[in-house]
Image (tube, rainbow, N blue to C red):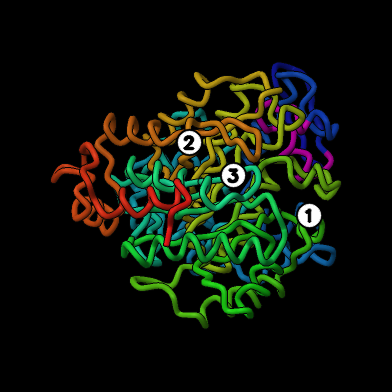
């Protein structure tokens, strides 16, 4: 189906809805690399005019990635909740934007609407929004998940404690874990990216993190972010698996490049549920995504990278995950060139994920060869805090020495909580107070001679018994 519009006497024609979506996107290097980005501001604005007049229903009949070629498309279309969609089914994309910004779109109505929205609808309306619009709507969305603590409550901010080490040294991991716990981080997860794929090494890391959690009765969960097939093998061998991690993308071909399928994720989800390790809930999957992954796998089908990213959320939604985060600037400047593009992408991803009913977090990050710096990340951090982000990363010094990229530190989380009055997960906050690490208002206290400090210090020095 061709789309046409005329602006200031100049006519514009578009081959299909996929092209309209791509050309309506804010400028970013990945779409230009793919040859699908707008060549002029006038062309971009014309595409947005067309998109604004497009009925939301059109996304149910005109697939951007062919139904017969892609299992994510089939998941989206076959799982669509028509009853949930009904309240906005008569709207165009532009009308939907206005509705989202109105008082009619409350936290309750947005939660009820989420199953009726497709990722393409969410991506489409985001393309018509300013940054402040993305913040305003996302702030109204509330997605709460639970495993050993409660994440995503309004007015709360959780942190993934990320104790990576370039050689997976247990003492180094323990030192970073202690550092994070003393700084009040770790309520989202103690989640480690391993340098090795060795099952014995992965098992040792899992046992270390589990021993810390069990010994000190910390109401949080651990995760070693290895491939899902490794997690399945470790679970079969009796390793203490809390969360199942996997990177995912927005097309079947992208996920094949990651070595995963819906069937494999189903198997992993069922296996983890059978372990019954959650205490306050059973949300147990952890997914990471990032704009550009489909293009880097030559699996984008001509779809713009932001829409591909939103489609990954349809796959995540199937599993009711505890955590999902966009690693927004990690892939590099080929896909998000500078701080401005990274900031916009982070706000888009958070908006789309929350609108679709997902517990979105963000790794506010950049690589050292991007045209970005820590000031850009501070800007995105504050915007996402205002927008109600569920969780961010906590990396010692904000410098990941294993993955070699720049993220957010334990101090960044303290800044955001102090500035915006945000709280930790309630169960985790109660534990910090029992350990005399925070006062009754949740503010850090100088660590006294607590059992945590003494025992974790033994790991750091190699004297652990």
Residue positioned 34% across, 33% down in the render? 416
Q: Quadrant of the C terminus?
A: bottom left
Identify the residue shown where x is 81% and y is 36%: 14
Q: Is residue 436 left or right of residue 315?
A: left
State which mark lies toward you, 1 or 3.
3
Q: Is residue 419 left or right of residue 123?
A: left
Tell me which segment is drawn in magenta: 15-31
Of the image marks 2 and 3, the number of the one nearer the N terminus: 3
Q: Is residue 285 magenta?
A: no
Q: In the rendering, which numbered label is found on residue 254?
A: 1
Percent coordinates x, y for residue 206 in the rendering? 54, 63
- Return the residue at label 3: 165
- Residues at marks 2 and 3, CA–CA distance in whole angstroms: 11 Å
Camera-nearest label, 2 or 3: 3
Residue 179, given in percent of the width and then of the height, sits at 40, 41
Is most of the magenta stretch helix, strand or loop?
A: helix
Dot 1 alpha-carbon crowd within 10 angstroms: few under 14, some 14 to 19, many 20 or more = many
- Which residue is disc 2 drawn over? 396
Q: Look at 27% across and 59% down and name the residue there.
A: 427
């Amino acid at each position: 189906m061709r789309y046409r519009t005329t602006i200031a006497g100049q006519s514009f024609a578009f081959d299909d809805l996929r092209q309209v979506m791509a050309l309506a996107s804010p400028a970013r290097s990945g779409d230009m690399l793919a040859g699908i980005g707008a060549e002029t501001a006038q062309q971009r604005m014309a595409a947005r005019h067309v998109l604004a007049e497009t009925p939301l229903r059109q996304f149910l009949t005109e697939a951007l990635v062919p139904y017969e070629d892609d299992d994510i498309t089939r998941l989206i279309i076959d799982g669509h909740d028509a009853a949930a969609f009904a309240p906005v089914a008569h709207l165009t994309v532009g009308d939907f934007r206005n509705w989202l910004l109105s008082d009619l779109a409350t936290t309750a109505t947005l939660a009820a609407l989420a199953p009726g929205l497709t990722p393409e609808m969410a991506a489409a309306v985001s393309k018509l929004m300013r940054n402040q619009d993305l913040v305003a709507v996302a702030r109204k969305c509330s997605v709460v998940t639970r495993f050993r603590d409660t994440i995503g409550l309004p007015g709360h901010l959780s942190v993934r404690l990320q104790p990576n080490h370039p050689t997976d040294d247990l003492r180094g991991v323990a030192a970073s874990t202690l550092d994070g716990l003393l700084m009040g981080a770790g309520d989202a997860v103690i989640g480690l990216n391993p340098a090795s794929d060795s099952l014995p090494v992965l098992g040792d890391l899992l046992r270390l993190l589990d021993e810390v959690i069990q010994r000190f009765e910390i109401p949080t969960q651990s995760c070693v972010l290895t491939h899902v097939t490794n997690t399945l093998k470790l679970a079969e061998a009796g390793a203490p698996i809390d969360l199942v991690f996997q990177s995912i993308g927005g097309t079947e071909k992208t996920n094949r490049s990651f070595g995963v399928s819906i069937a494999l994720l189903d198997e992993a989800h069922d296996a983890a549920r059978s372990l019954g390790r959650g205490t306050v809930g059973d949300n147990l999957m952890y997914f990471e995504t990032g704009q550009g992954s489909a293009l880097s796998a030559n699996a984008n089908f001509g779809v713009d990278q932001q829409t591909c990213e939103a489609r990954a959320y349809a796959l995540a939604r199937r599993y009711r995950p505890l955590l999902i985060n966009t690693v927004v600037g990690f892939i590099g400047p080929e896909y998000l060139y500078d701080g401005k593009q990274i900031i916009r992408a982070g706000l888009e991803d958070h908006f789309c994920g929350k609108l679709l009913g997902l517990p979105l977090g963000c790794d506010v990050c950049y690589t050292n060869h991007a045209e970005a710096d820590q000031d850009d990340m501070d800007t995105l951090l504050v915007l996402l805090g205002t927008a109600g982000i569920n969780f961010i990363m906590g990396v010692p010094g904000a410098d990941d020495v294993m993955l070699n990229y720049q993220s957010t530190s334990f101090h960044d989380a303290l800044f955001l909580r102090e500035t915006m009055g945000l709280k930790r997960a309630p169960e985790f906050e109660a534990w910090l107070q029992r350990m005399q690490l925070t006062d009754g208002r949740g503010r850090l206290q100088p660590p006294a001679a607590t059992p945590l400090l003494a025992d974790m210090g033994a790991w750091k020095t190699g004297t652990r018994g």
